[in-house]
Image: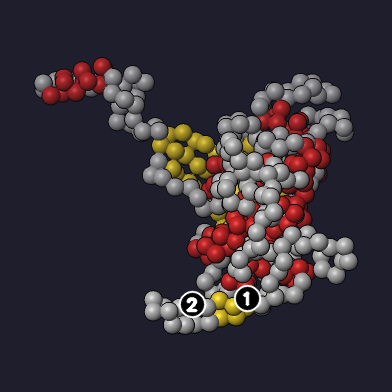
Amino acid sequence: MPPPLEHDEQQTAGGGGHRAAPPPPPPNMLTFSSCSSGTPSCTSVATTTTTTTATITNSSGAVVHPTTSSPPSSAADRLRPAANPFPLVLKFEEVVYKVKLGQPAAGWCDKLSAAANIAGRKKKAASPSGSPSSSPREKTIISGMSGVVRPGEMLAMLGPSGSGKTTLLTALGGRHSGSRAMLSGKITYSGHPFSGTVKRRTGFVTQHDVLYPHLTVAETLWYTALLRLPRALTAGEKRAQAEAVAHELGLAKVAHSMVGGVRGVRGLSGGERKRVSIGLEMLVDPSLLLLDEPTSGLDSTTAARIVGTLRRMAAGGGRTVVVTIHQPSSRLYHMFDKVLLLSADGCPIYYGRAADALGYFADVGFASPLSVNPADLMLDLANGTPPFSHSHTHSI
């Protein structure tokens, strides 16, 4: 049983694959500086055009609407404000997610029963499972999930494979769909239900990077900015937004490297590709950022850099960040503010402050040395194989 919640939460519970001598970018393409302006030794990756003039003509060649945009003069000026102007409180209460499995394929017993009914025999036959063949079957994926994540906080969802971490993350992001899915409970965003406005303020990073391998980092960010940012923004403002994201995530040095990731196309490292995926969602300046296994397949150092970046984005930008993570190291674990531990069958075991987890489990009989990784202890408990206790051995 999860511990008591806080008083205001009671029961709510470097890169490779560079192109050789890339040509200068077109006037409307992103330009990146490898260091801040004003530094004597600063070398630019590409030269920024001071003034961009775009001329639109009709079919006869006549000028329709000339426009002029002047980007900011320095990289520091192009960076967006760190504070999020739209803070969002994510709250979920007693969330249950079920799926309908449908009816099993008709066997010989069902066929014989149907034939008997047609012949006028009213004998009631049962399905091979012992229940009537017409009874629906359901499977509970997650049950009784509750918690609160406030702006500036980062929540880690821990649990063994198949415990429902991704399912819960998908539900929190308003992405559950399908006629077989049944979601109950209450999920609110600053007290409001999910809506188009919340969707526009939410970023969702999937476990597997979905990137075009033959585009460069700059092209990927630029095209995404053109497609996802509001039409009210000018091309210069969209370009500045994309450049700010690249600087924030440390992608300026690989701006003109191909993404790669497929056979025959050398490109970015796994950590750099993951940062590009995060950058695509950061373009919309989300208030709520949801990430599914962002450290999967990465070495410990790269994983620490990714989580450290998320930590800065949450604390410094006032964003609400929720992350599913499979087996974090002790260093990664202590970067999170809160933890939600799921059992193998999708039930909550612990929700609360990450720093309080070891103390809670010690109070219920699962004491452990201070040197132990809290995530290892919690995953052992979630899998039903608790470690040795000083008093006696428990089983879940």
Task: Write the residue at 31% across / 25% down.
Answer: 105
Residue at the outermost left position: 119
Please state which of residues 66 and 140 is positioned toward the viewer in this rendering: 66
Mark 1 element type: strand
Q: Quadrant of residue 117?
A: top left
Which amino acid type is marked by label 2?
A: Ile
So how many labels did they put on this image?
A: 2
Q: In the picture shown, does residue 39 fall above or below 299?
A: below
Q: Which mark is residue 56?
A: 2
Q: Position of residue 48 (x, y in %)?
A: 71, 69
Which amino acid type is marked by label 1?
A: Thr
Task: Write the residue at 72% across / 66% down.
Answer: 47
Task: Write the residue at 31% across / 21% down.
Answer: 127
Q: Position of residue 377 (x, y in %)?
A: 76, 30
Judge from the rendering whether residue 234 lies leftward or rightward of residue 114; answer left or right.
right
Mark 2 element type: loop
**Residue 259 appearing in the image:** yes
Q: Are marks 1 and 2 in contact (CB under 8 Å)?
A: no
Q: Quadrant of residue 131?
A: top left
Q: In the picture shown, does residue 92 fall above or below 72?
A: above
Q: Quadrant of residue 263?
A: top right
Q: Quadrant of the N terminus?
A: top right
Q: Quadrant of the C terminus?
A: top right
Judge from the rendering whether residue 349 lies leftward or rightward of residue 233; answer left or right.
right
Q: Which mark is residue 52?
A: 1
